[in-house]
Amino acid sequence: MNGNNNNYYNNPLRRDLSLSKHVEVLNYRVHVACTPNNTHIVMSDERGQPIKNGCWTGGSCSFKGVNRSGYEAGYQCAVRAFERIKQLAQEVPGARFEFLFKGFGQGRDAVFKALMTSEGDDVRPFVNRVTDNTPIKIGGTRAKKTRRL
């Protein structure tokens, strides 16, 4: 190492400096499924089991009908999920979160923007990873005939 060890300890990307050696790190997953009609956010533990009070949709955030698929519905789901993440981070000192995005909808952009703006300032220190799990069809079966009116 060179003489400047100060950068090693002040690196914001270095994880677990604030955690003691005796604190067990629990990795939670935040599944964000975005469809053209709705946005679903489900929090689960390490084994994939949903946690209590950890599920939000556009409909549960008081958006009905076509509005469930909108940007604002996805943003409100994200804000409510962030409140639960803050609560879990206080209850469990070693809590870390992984965001798994799936699908292409307006809610996908809304959740990501909420995480990057001031709404996500308190949540970002607990996020380990952001992953895209969207299935992409390569080849596969022939597409359905297009509908013409």
Image (tube, rainbow, N blue to C red):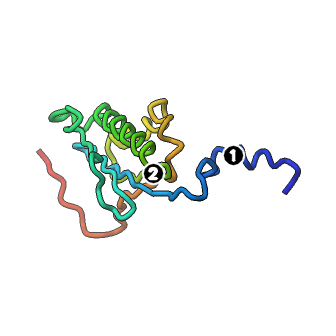
Q: Nearer the viewer, residue 134 or 24?
A: 24
Q: Nearer the viewer, residue 134 or 25?
A: 25
- Structural distance between the alpha carbons of marks 1 and 2: 19 Å
User: Residue 59: x, y in percent?
Assistant: 19, 38
Q: Residues within 10 Å of mark 2 (few under 14, many from 20)?
A: many
Q: Is residue 131 above or below residue 87?
A: below
The quadrant the N terminus occupies is: bottom right
Q: Is residue 53 above or below residue 22?
A: above
Residue furthest to the bottom: 140
User: Residue 134: x, y in percent?
Assistant: 37, 57
For the image, the number of numbered tags is 2
Q: Nearer the viewer, residue 94 or 102?
A: 94
User: Residue 148: x, y in percent?
Assistant: 14, 48
Q: Determine whether, in the image, residue 12 is placed left or right of residue 35.
A: right
Q: Is residue 148 above or below residue 117?
A: below
Residue furthest to the left: 149
Q: Nearer the viewer, residue 36 or 55?
A: 55
What residue sits 76% from the left and 45% below the top? 7
Q: Where is residue 12, by image quadrant?
A: top right
The type of residue carrying mark 1 is Asn
> Which residue bears the numbered disc 2?
97
Q: Residues within 10 Å of mark 1 (few under 14, many from 20)?
A: few
> Which residue bears the numbered disc 1?
11
